[in-house]
Image: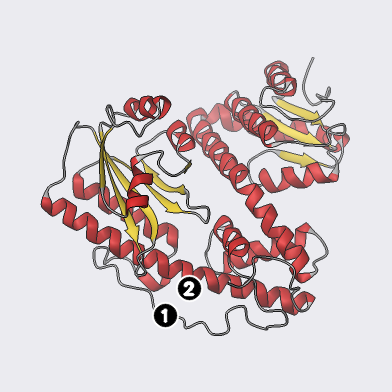
């Protein structure tokens, strides 16, 4: 018999996606009467990125069979990584195996009842959780780097206070945690002893979005704007498939919004480097790029096959350029007709939409995100004292 009464106990680091632990967990989940699998992590000292990817797949597969994963007795460093990465995913983390075993029957019964009553709804929820988990895994190294900067700069007591500061500032200004962490890592640090991070900053009003009149630009969060931009762009050409990517500090394109694609597509194109796709070319050239999916040499074989499987045959990518001329993102529209060009009217509307949204996104980065950084700096300074000169990128 398997299940919470007989925990699975791996020995050694979780350092590869096909670690034997994951197949053992899936077997235990199928054999368990309660559907809950308890994993004793007391002998695991390290979980690498490859190991975490394997854990993600294991969680997804276990959830799809109606199971639940309880992790227990992990060393503190491992437990901290798991708590940060697996927050709000349904995976529960316990200090001891005994605690996990006591909690398992009740939790498993509840999951079983929900699955029996609404299997399709539950499966969709679990798929969303797994997608969110993948996103957290991609974000974790950056957030950990931001925590390290806060620890050193403000002499905090540990990673938890640093994470709390990030989370509070993120929520107070409606800025994604990953966005705030990236800004903290890349924006020049405040002057030592300064009460303000940006003492000479002039706070400007949000630029207008004439093609999106329903949005109140000054009080709208970035997620709402990029979602509406993408849908307006798709409506302009009558497309049911599209995505919008933002430029990250490493000059890569990171998926921010999408419509009409499955999770495999979203995972594959989550982050795109220079020259890998038409959207990357549009960002590099700062102009509209049209591409025939079947023949364009920019695509790898794997990328081409995946895009063709969605029904897309032509893609139009438009760079979103701010008032300074800097490309801040790209939206791409996929259509089913091979060689489908845009009309002059469509191209004119999309060019204006890209320019307006680029100006707004640049304003958001320079105003709202910096408001969040200022909030974080003042809270940390008030609570812990003046910042150190040793952390973060220098002024320049």
x and y percent of residue 62 in the render?
A: 63, 26
Label 2 sits on a secondary structure element that is: helix
Seen from the viewer's position, the closer of residues 89 and 269 is 269
Label 1 sits on a secondary structure element that is: loop
Seen from the viewer's position, the closer of residues 295 and 102 is 295
* Disc 2: which residue: 367
**Going 65% across and 29% down the picture, which residue do you hit?**
54
- Between the C-alphas of marks 2 and 1, the distance is 7 Å
Quarter occupied by the N terminus: top right
Give the farthest residue toward the front: 396
**Going 37% across and 32% down the picture, which residue do you hit?**
299
Q: Are marks 2 and 1 in contact (CB under 8 Å)?
A: yes
Q: Is residue 322 left or right of residue 143?
A: left
x and y percent of residue 90 in the render?
A: 65, 39
Mark 2 nearby-residue class (10 Å; few <14, some 14–19, many ≥20): some
Mark 1 nearby-residue class (10 Å; few <14, some 14–19, many ≥20): few
Tell me which numbered mark, 2 or 1, is placed earlier along the sequence. Answer: 1
* Disc 1: which residue: 204
The image quadrant that residue 323 belongs to is: bottom left
x and y percent of residue 110 in the render?
A: 66, 34
The image quadrant that residue 8 belongs to is: top right
Q: Is residue 303 left or right of residue 144?
A: left
Instruction: Relative to 255, say whether 195 is above or below.
Output: below
Instruction: Relative to 104, say whether 183 is above or below.
Output: below
**Going 79% across and 29% down the picture, which residue do you hit?**
39
Instruction: Relative to 89, say whether 382 is above or below.
Output: below
Q: Is residue 328 left or right of residue 27?
A: left
Seen from the viewer's position, the closer of residues 88 and 112 is 88
x and y percent of residue 314 in the render?
A: 24, 35
Quarter occupied by the C terminus: bottom right
């Amino acid at each position: 018999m398997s299940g919470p009464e007989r925990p699975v106990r791996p020995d050694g680091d979780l350092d590869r996606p096909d670690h034997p632990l994951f197949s053992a967990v899936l077997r235990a989940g199928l054999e368990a009467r309660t559907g809950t699998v308890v994993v004793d992590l007391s002998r695991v000292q390290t979980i690498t990125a490859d190991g975490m990817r394997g854990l993600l797949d294991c969680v997804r597969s276990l959830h799809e069979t109606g199971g639940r994963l309880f992790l227990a007795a992990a060393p503190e460093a491992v437990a901290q990584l798991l708590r940060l990465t697996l927050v709000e995913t349904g995976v529960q983390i316990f200090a001891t195996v005994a605690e996990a075993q006591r909690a398992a029957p009740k939790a498993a019964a509840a999951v079983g009842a929900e699955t029996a009553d609404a299997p399709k709804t539950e499966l969709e929820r679990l798929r969303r959780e797994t997608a969110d988990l993948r996103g957290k895994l991609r974000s974790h190294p950056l957030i950990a780097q931001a925590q390290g900067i806060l620890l050193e700069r403000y002499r905090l007591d540990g990673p938890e206070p640093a994470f709390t500061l990030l989370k509070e500032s993120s929520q107070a200004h409606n800025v994604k945690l990953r966005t705030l962490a990236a800004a903290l890592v890349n924006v020049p640090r405040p002057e030592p002893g300064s009460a303000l991070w940006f003492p000479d900053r002039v706070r400007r009003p949000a630029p207008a979005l004439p093609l999106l009149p329903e949005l109140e630009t000054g009080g709208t969060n970035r997620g709402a704007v990029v979602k509406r931009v993408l849908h307006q762009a798709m409506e302009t050409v009558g497309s049911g498939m599209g995505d919008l990517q933002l430029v990250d500090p490493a000059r890569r394109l990171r998926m921010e919004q999408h419509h009409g694609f499955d999770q495999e597509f979203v995972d594959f194109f989550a982050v795109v480097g220079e020259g890998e796709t038409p959207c990357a070319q549009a960002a590099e050239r700062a102009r509209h790029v049209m591409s025939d999916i079947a023949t364009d040499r920019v695509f790898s074989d794997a990328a081409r096959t995946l895009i063709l499987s969605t029904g897309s045959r032509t893609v139009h990518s438009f760079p979103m350029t701010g008032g300074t001329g800097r490309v801040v993102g790209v939206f791409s529209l996929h259509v089913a007709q091979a060689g489908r060009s845009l009309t002059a009217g469509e191209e004119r509307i999309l060019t204006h939409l890209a320019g307006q949204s680029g100006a707004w996104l640049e304003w958001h980065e320079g105003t709202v995100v910096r408001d969040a950084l200022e909030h974080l700096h003042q809270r940390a300074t008030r609570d812990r004292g003046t910042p150190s000169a040793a952390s973060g990128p220098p002024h320049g």
